[in-house]
């Protein structure tokens, strides 16, 4: 597993450029921890501003729950994440 340290802006750029549908992600932001499969990545414009949202199917949820993470909204709160690409080496990112 590759381990890297990134600033908040670099971490968001990494997520935007590297996380694809069906990859797995473990992400910690604020007091939230979400782990699961990325079902969708959305770069639509919202209220006239660029957007970046990830839809994640939570692992081991009895309800089969999904969560939508507005990355731009929580970017200052991202602590760390582990990206498991469908094809490739896992990357452990710590936000500094």
Image: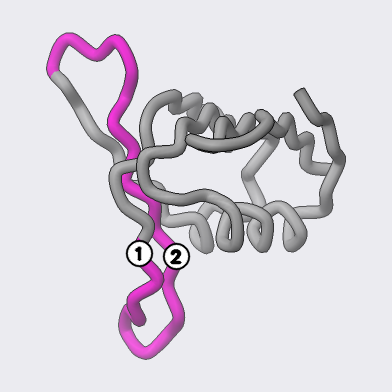
Question: Which scheme is used to colour this image of the protein?
Answer: one colour
Q: Residue furthest left?
A: 63
The numbered dot on residue 52 is: 2
From which residue to which does the magenta span run?
42-63
Q: Residue furthest front?
A: 87
Which residue is pictured at 42% across the width and 72% down the height? 51
Between the residue at mark 1 and the residue at mark 2, the CA separation in whole angstroms equals 6 Å
| Residue 91, position as x, y percentages in the image | 71, 33
Which residue in the protein does label 1 denote?
Answer: 42
| Residue 55, position as x, y percentages in the image | 32, 46
Q: Would residue 26 be counted in the magenta stretch?
A: no
Identify the element where label 1 is drawn.
Answer: strand
**Up/down of 18 relative to 58, above or below:** below
| Residue 15, position as x, y percentages in the image | 59, 53
| Quarter of the image where the N terminus is located | top right
| Residue 85, position as x, y percentages in the image | 55, 37
């Amino acid at each position: 597993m590759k381990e890297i340290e990134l600033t908040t802006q670099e971490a968001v750029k990494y997520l935007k450029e590297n996380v694809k549908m069906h990859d797995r992600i473990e992400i910690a932001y604020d007091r939230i921890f979400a782990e699961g499969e990325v079902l969708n990545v959305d770069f639509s414009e919202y209220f006239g501003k660029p957007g970046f949202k990830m839809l994640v199917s939570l692992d081991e949820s009895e309800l089969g729950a999904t969560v939508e993470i507005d990355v731009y909204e929580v970017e200052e709160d991202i602590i760390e994440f582990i990206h498991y690409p469908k094809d490739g080496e896992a990357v452990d990112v710590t936000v500094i």
